[in-house]
Image (cartoon, grey):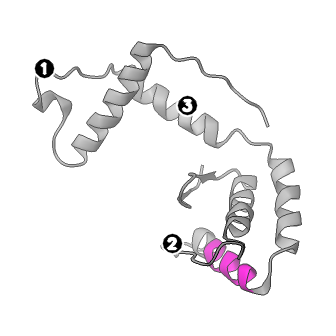
């Protein structure tokens, strides 16, 4: 895996934060311009923030992930395999969906998560941590 160390200035971080706030406001029919004297993000920040996120989420060694995925899938239990297949089918057959995997500690929820992320990322697609939010790159 290639690691990119991004050094951002305080102004760049402020611009990215303002851009994200403005993006949320716009989804609700408002903008930072509606709240003077709030500063407005620079025009270039939206391009930079999108590119940084895309770069981070597609910067994986896919051949390593393919091998990891093979090893993980072999070790899935029958129940874990059913969960894995259901979610993968929803991701790649256009069905979509919301899935909640619940169980006691030690039942393999993280193992299923790792298997799913290895499968999806090995195809060059994007997984956002914290929830399985699938998007084709």
Q: Earlier in the sequence, mark 2 or mark 3?
A: 3
Query: Can you give x and y, in whole percent of width and height, for residue 62 in the image?
Result: 80, 48
Q: Is residue 74 left or right of residue 36?
A: right
Q: Earlier in the sequence, mark 3 or mark 1?
A: 1
Residue at 88% across / 57% down in the picture?
Answer: 67
Magenta span of residues: 79-89
Residue at 72% across / 79% down in the picture?
Answer: 80
Residue at 80% across / 76% down in the picture?
Answer: 76
Which residue is label 2 attached to? 96
Query: Regarding mark 3 in the picture, which secondary structure is present there?
Result: helix
Which residue is label 3 attached to? 52
Query: Can you give x and y, in whole percent of width and height, for residue 137 in the image?
Result: 60, 49
Query: Regarding mark 1 in the picture, which secondary structure is present there?
Result: loop
Q: Main secondary structure of the magenta part?
A: helix
Which residue is label 1 attached to? 37
Which image quarter: residue 5?
Answer: top right
Q: Earlier in the sequence, mark 1 or mark 2?
A: 1
State the separation of the CA atoms marked 3 and 1. Answer: 29 Å
What count of labels does the image hold?
Answer: 3
State the separation of the CA atoms marked 1 and 2. Answer: 42 Å
């Amino acid at each position: 895996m290639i690691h990119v160390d991004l050094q951002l200035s305080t102004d760049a971080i402020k611009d990215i934060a303002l851009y994200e706030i403005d993006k949320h406001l716009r989804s609700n029919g408002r903008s930072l311009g509606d709240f003077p004297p709030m500063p407005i993000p620079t025009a270039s920040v939206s391009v930079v923030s999108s590119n940084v996120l895309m770069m981070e989420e597609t910067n994986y060694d896919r051949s390593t992930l393919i091998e990891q995925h093979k090893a993980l899938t072999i070790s899935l239990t029958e129940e874990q395999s059913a969960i894995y297949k259901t979610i993968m089918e929803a991701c790649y057959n256009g069905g979509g969906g919301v899935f909640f995997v619940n169980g006691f500690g030690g039942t393999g929820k993280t193992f299923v998560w790792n298997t799913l992320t290895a499968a999806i990322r090995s195809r060059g697609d994007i997984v956002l941590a914290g929830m399985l939010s699938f998007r084709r790159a």
